[in-house]
Image (cartoon, rainbow, N blue to C red):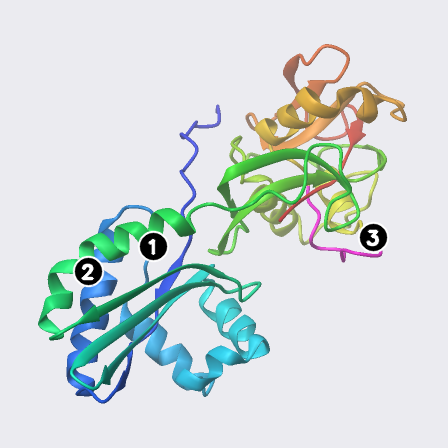
Amino acid sequence: MSVALFSQQSAKPKVVIVPFDAKGVPQDEADVVTELFISEYAATGKATVPDRNSFDKLAKEQSFQASSWSDSEKIAKLGKAINANQAVVGQIMKFREEIIVTIKVIDINTTEILSSKTERLKDISQLFDKIPGICKELAEKSNYVPMQYKVGDEGEGGGIIFYVSQEGFVVYDGMGGEKICHYLEMSKSTLGVSNWAPNKDYINTFVEIGYGKSNTYKILNYYKNFSLTEENCAAYRCSIYSTEKASAGEWFLPSRDELDEMYKTMNKTVISDATENWFWSSSAYNDNNAWEQRFSDGGQSYFGKNGDGTNSVRAIRAF
């Protein structure tokens, strides 16, 4: 049974539209603006936007209020709960005879303002026609993520950066969760040699970038009743790896395409301390074999998954 191939999904930030705050104008009018913003921001195609009910429920559970946007700890906590990258925060105020609307897009992880817009209007109804253009402008400006690292740098987890994506890519955890990341880092040294798994059986894994973590979870979950060791399971060897900066569980066995990116940028570094030139990926090929890659020339093949043979293992991490 061969592994089905899927095209890499285009990563988009997950953006929550916070209910607009009203000062001097009716709250129901601000609510209308909020609903329009949710619809139009999603229509830009540049972001994934959860519905308002999802946000309201989580905000209530976290006792999160409009004033909480000045508290970076509360923002980070809410962002983690809703798995969002950015938030649109707006305020509609009446000042003398004018309606002033301020809108900011905030990076939930850093609380940095990514983009902002201010409109001065005679009547709030004038805002309705402007909302599609405002959403497009804010989304385009907020879509840029400045790269803090380059290939070869030490990563957040203490590894070596081998893959950088300005656009970002989706990382799947195998349990239904997903996260947009921009970097892949690998362990600074080869962890040793291992069998792919304790026995032969097919596991539904994938080959694309973003699936290594999911594959690793599926392998560990499938063999949870076995006595896993670093020698009999490459995914297990990666899952227990840790550094001073990143805990065990954050590292995983790369997918076939993630392994290929490692070869493209860091092959000499990788083979410098490897006792075997072939490296395992976390992507199964069929019941009996899994994808592997030779780091002397980049050749990809498939090899016996159980005790038929061993390959070198390098752990990676996404952020």
**How crowded is the residue under tag 2: few (<14 C-alpha within 10 Å), some, or many (20+)?**
some
**In the drawing, does residue 276 fall left or right of residue 43?**
right
- Give the mark nearest the N terminus, 2 or 1: 2
Residue 194 visible within the image: yes
Q: Please report contact status of discs 2 and 1: CB closer than 8 Å, yes or no.
A: no
- Give the residue at mark 2: 131
- Give the residue at mark 3: 243
Residue 120 to residue 5: above or below: below
Residue 188's disc number:
none
- Give the residue at mark 1: 138
Under mark 3, the amino acid is Thr
Tell me the element at label 3: loop
Q: Which callout, 2 or 3, points to the residue nearer the camera?
A: 2
Tell me the element at label 2: helix
- Give the mark nearest the N terminus, 1 or 3: 1
Q: Which callout, 1 or 3, points to the residue nearer the camera?
A: 1
Tell me the element at label 1: helix
Under mark 2, the amino acid is Ile
Label 1 – label 3 distance at C-alpha: 38 Å
Q: Which residues are magenta?
A: 244-252
Which picture quadrant has residue 123? bottom left
